[in-house]
Amino acid sequence: MSSHCQHCHRGKQYGHKVSHAKNRLNRIFFPNLQKLKVLKNGLAVRVVFCAGCIKRLKKDGKIGLFSLWKYQTAKVATSPVMAKEGVKKEIKAEKKVKEEKKAKKPTLSKKEKAKTTLKIEDIVGKKS
């Protein structure tokens, strides 16, 4: 396995292990590298990414030349061009859903919030 991320090129770093008595011993810090299957120019490719790049890829759906691999039907997955278009459509659909959720929330202006008054019956409950 490679020793560096294929996107950000983060690799091993050298430093010191410091004990409670402040004794310094040499040590190596390794990045959290993971194997991942992504699309590169419409083709499925195995790459090695660090955990930070994987988080960014999942959030944005794409980093650099790499785009997120999503499992699709056999018909779409057979053609690399169709697979790339399918991923784009899914990303657009997800964005639309997020925008619809934001649009559904009614926003009140400061004046409208000030006009609304709380009734004791609503908070405590009605006396019977």
Image: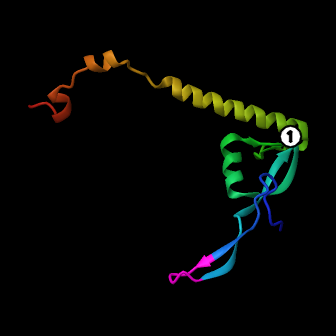
Which element is circle 1 on?
Answer: helix
The image quarter containing residue 90 is: top right
In the image, is residue 118 part of the stretch drawn in magenta? Answer: no
Mark 1 lies on residue: 75
Residue 6 left/right relative to 17: right
Q: Position of residue 101 (x, y in %)?
A: 53, 29
- The magenta region covers 17-23
Residue 22 belongs to the span the image colors magenta: yes
Quadrant location of the C terminus?
top left
Q: Main secondary structure of the magenta part?
A: loop
Q: Position of residue 53 (x, y in %)?
A: 71, 52
Amino acid under disc 1 = Lys
On the image, which quarter does residue 13 sit in?
bottom right
Residue 108 left/right relative to 33: left
Q: Residues within 10 Å of mark 1 (few under 14, many from 20)?
A: few
| Left or right: residue 32 compared with residue 119 | right
Question: In front here: 28 or 116?
Answer: 28
Residue under the image location 80 percent in, 62 percent down: 4
In the depicted structure, whether residue 102 falls above or below residue 80: above
Residue 47 quadrant: bottom right
Q: Quadrant of the N terminus?
A: bottom right
Residue sitting at x 67%, y 54%: 52
User: Residue 96: horizontal and vertical position, in percent?
Assistant: 63, 27
Indicate whether 16 appears above or below 46: below
Q: Nearer the viewer, residue 30 or 108?
A: 30
Q: Position of residue 72 (x, y in %)?
A: 78, 43
